[in-house]
Structures are given as structure tokens and as C-alpha cells.
Image (cartoon, rainbow, N blue to C red):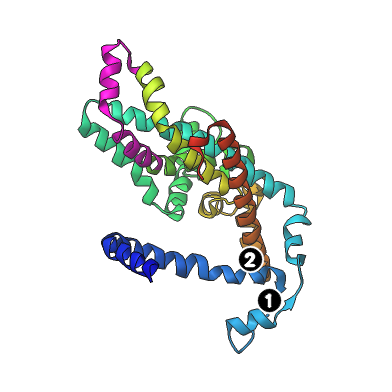
């Protein structure tokens, strides 16, 4: 009884905070935790039953790990795994460097109006869908009337058929990913920078420290815990790719598949052509499981180096 009274007392004391958290908790319960029961489809040969979804899951034949063979026995397994991991590794560390650099530069601008203008301009692409961005890219790279080809021809060069030339697309996709995500990343780091006590910088200036020394010895160490946390979480999703980026920007051009095909787009095309629901469930479970393992491993490595900077 005493434990129940203590619990009710805490609930009453924190009722405002709990009400603030409630919408997010309900959303996660409905769309994150309840659907987890559906992962059993990855181990079954799913067949629709007229009695409903639950009956379909229960009465479908158990096939074990057969659905996972789709990802590992295909001739494209190496290509989609290489592309997914390669792009994500590059973007995690390149994105970290660029977002931190831009956030620091924005805080160092003396004219705050220009800083707000630059910040808004950088954040705006985050709200654009990849469908819209894909049309913008097409206006730049179109063979006949693309802006880039018009400029190349103006200077006497020969136009490039971008959508038939795979070698350019790793650079194009990397640029588009950085262009869309830098503004959002900057907001996170700007919030952290605003929380740094200004007396540290005042003391450093009294000691004769320049801007670079202040950044090196104050700003970066203060941002390190946040940088490590976001990097660990990003590594946990390293087997996931941005479907819209890899599908809409290259316009699903088949000749570009060696450099644009990733696990997500490959599974989508497989589902569209075969309607195999259990195959996509197996792919999603595989990605989540590997991501979970990577988070645990990365966190253990960070804990070995510096226990205070570990995620948990």
C-alpha cells in the first residue's frame, strides 16, 4: 500500500510533464510497439485469410529462415549491401563534419540577422520531399534542356547523359543528402552551442586565446557528447537507406542500379513485382536486428574509451 501511495503521489506531482509525454508515448505504442508482433510474418509463408489479419498470420505456414534467403542468395546481394553500407559510412562522418562546421560558423557570425537568414536557407531543403527535389535535379541534369548541359555546350563542350552514366551518381547522391540534411543537423548543434556558458570564452579571451583555440579547447569538447550520441544512433541505422533519395533522384533508371540500388529500393522492387509481403518483413527485421547489434557494439567501444560519453 505504501508503494502504491508513493506512486500516486509521484504521478500527481508530475502530472503536467506526464500529460506532455502522453501523445508521444501513445504514438510509439500504436505505431512502434504493437506492429512488432507482425515480425512473425518474416518466418511464415504469408497467405491472406478471409477471417482477418490475425487469422492470416496464425494459419500461414511456418517456413523458418527461408524468406531471408531472398537477400543473401541473390546475385545483387553484394551490390546492395556495399551501396547501403558505403553511402551510410560516408554520410555519417562527412555529415558530422559539415553540420558541426556550419553550426560553429553560424554562431561566430556577428550579424545575427544574416545568421538567421543563412540558417533558414539551410533548413528549408529539409521540408522538401524527394519527389520535388527529384524534379529540380532533373531540370539541372536533363540531356536536352538541363542547365548543366546548356552551360557545358555554351563553353564548347559536349553534353552528358547523366541518367545513363553511373560514375557521376555517388557524388550527386552525396551532395543531395548533405544539401537536404545539413540544416536539420545544424539546428541540433546550434541548440547545444547556445547552452555553453559564455564565461568559458571570456576567460579564454583574457588568457589570449584566439577563435580557433576557443573552438578547439571549448566548443568541440562541449559538443563531443552530443556528437558521439548522434553518431551511435546513426550507426544503428546504417543498414537503412533513404528510399526517396535512392529511388526518386535517379528516377529509377536501371542502368544506374550498380551505384544507386540499396536494400530498401531492392526490397521495394521485389515487393512490387512479386507481392511477397513476408520477404519485405524479413528484410526489415534483418535491418533492425543488425542495427541493434551495431548500436550495442559501438556503445561498448565508446564506453571503453570514455565511460561518460557512452549512450547507456
- Report, in whole angstroms, how far the alpha carbon at label 1 lies from the one at label 2: 10 Å
**Residue 57 drawn at (x, y percent):** 64, 79
Please name the residue shown 54% across and 70% down the image. Answer: 35
Q: Residue furthest bottom?
A: 51
Q: Are marks 1 and 2 in contact (CB under 8 Å)?
A: yes
Q: Main secondary structure of the magenta part?
A: helix
Residue count near mark 1 (Cα–Cα under 10 Å), binned few <14, some 14–19, many ≥20? many
Whether residue 244 is situated above or below residue 203 in the rendered picture: below
Chain part drawn in magenta: 185-211
Which image quarter: residue 129? bottom left
Q: Secondary structure at mark 2?
A: helix
User: Position of 235 compared to 178: left or right?
Assistant: right
Marking on residue 46? 1
Q: Which mark is residue 281?
A: 2
Please say whether residue 12 is one of the residues in the magenta stretch.
no
Quick one: which residue is furthest to the front in this view? 2
Q: Nearer the viewer, residue 209 or 124?
A: 209
Amino acid at each position: 500500500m505504501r508503494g502504491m501511495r508513493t506512486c500516486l503521489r509521484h504521478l500527481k506531482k508530475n502530472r503536467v510533464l506526464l500529460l506532455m509525454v502522453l501523445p508521444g508515448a501513445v504514438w510509439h505504442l500504436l505505431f512502434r510497439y504493437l506492429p512488432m508482433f507482425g515480425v512473425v510474418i518474416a518466418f511464415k509463408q504469408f497467405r491472406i485469410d478471409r477471417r482477418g489479419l490475425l487469422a492470416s498470420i496464425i494459419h500461414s505456414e511456418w517456413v523458418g529462415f527461408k524468406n531471408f534467403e531472398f537477400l543473401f542468395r541473390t546475385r545483387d546481394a553484394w551490390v546492395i549491401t556495399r551501396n547501403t553500407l558505403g553511402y551510410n559510412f560516408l554520410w555519417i562522418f562527412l555529415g558530422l563534419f559539415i553540420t558541426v562546421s556550419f553550426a560553429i560558423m553560424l554562431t561566430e557570425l556577428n550579424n545575427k540577422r544574416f545568421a538567421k537568414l543563412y540558417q533558414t536557407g539551410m533548413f528549408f531543403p529539409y521540408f522538401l520531399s524527394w519527389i520535388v527535389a527529384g524534379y529540380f535535379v532533373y531540370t539541372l541534369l536533363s540531356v536536352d534542356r538541363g542547365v548543366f548541359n546548356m552551360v557545358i555546350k555554351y563553353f564548347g563542350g559536349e553534353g552528358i547523359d547523366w541518367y545513363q552514366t553511373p560514375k557521376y551518381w555517388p557524388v550527386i547522391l552525396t551532395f543531395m543528402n548533405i544539401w537536404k540534411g545539413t540544416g536539420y543537423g545544424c539546428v541540433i548543434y546550434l541548440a547545444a552551442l547556445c547552452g555553453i556558458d559564455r564565461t568559458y570564452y571570456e576567460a579564454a579571451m583574457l588568457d589570449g586565446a584566439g577563435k580557433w583555440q576557443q573552438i578547439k579547447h571549448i566548443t568541440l569538447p562541449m559538443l563531443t557528447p552530443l556528437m558521439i550520441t548522434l553518431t551511435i544512433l546513426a550507426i544503428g541505422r546504417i543498414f537503412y537507406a533513404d528510399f526517396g533519395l535512392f529511388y526518386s533522384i535517379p528516377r529509377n533508371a536501371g542502368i544506374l542500379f550498380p551505384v544507386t540500388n540499396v536494400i530498401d529500393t531492392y526490397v521495394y522492387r521485389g515487393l512490387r513485382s512479386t507481392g511477397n509481403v513476408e520477404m519485405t518483413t524479413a528484410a526489415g527485421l534483418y535491418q533492425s536486428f543488425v542495427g541493434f547489434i551495431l548500436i550495442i557494439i559501438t556503445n561498448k567501444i565508446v564506453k571503453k574509451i570514455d565511460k561518460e560519453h557512452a549512450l547507456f
